[in-house]
Amino acid sequence: MNLRRLSRWVAALVAIPIAAIAGIELVEYRAEMHARAFCERFPIGTSMQDVTKAAASEGDPGLRVLLSDHIAIGYTGITASSRHLCLVDAEAGKVTLTTYGYMD
């Protein structure tokens, strides 16, 4: 095997894991940004009806909880166990708390 061919193999062996790691980071970053953006859309005092309407089509269906005083919207990262969540709590029909959370 000549030196040029060897250098190509080494470059490929280095590039593949770097690209895989970058891809994983991108998927995780996007899931986190979606969850954070959903939380930021609803400041304290917002009508919970507005949150419920928006939440109906957001996140992963299996990670969506819609209750009258609590809404959880989840986005999956690279694995099913990597979950980025926006939690919204309310009292008397108004948002009292929005929180981003991560579960692994």
Image (tube, rainbow, N blue to C red):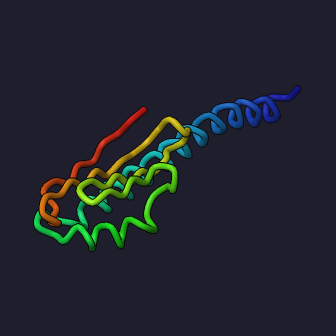
Q: Is residue 97 left or right of residue 26?
A: left
Give the image location of residue 65, x and y in percent.
39, 53
Q: Is residue 41 left or right of residue 74?
A: left
- What residue sits 42% from the left and 67% below the top? 56
Query: In the rendered view, would you say 101 is above or below 64?
Result: above
Give the image location of residue 35, x and y in percent.
35, 54
In terms of depth relative to the viewer, which is nearer, 52 or 44?
52
- What residue sits 16% from the left and 62% below the top? 95
Query: In the rendered view, would you say 83 is above or below 40?
Result: above
Q: State the count of labels.
A: 0
Give the image location of residue 17, x and y in percent.
62, 34
- What residue sits 70% from the left and 31% below the top? 13
Residue reaching furthest right? Answer: 1
In terms of depth relative to the viewer, which is nearer, 34 or 89?
89
Give the image location of residue 34, x and y in percent.
39, 58
Location of the N terminus (image quadrant): top right
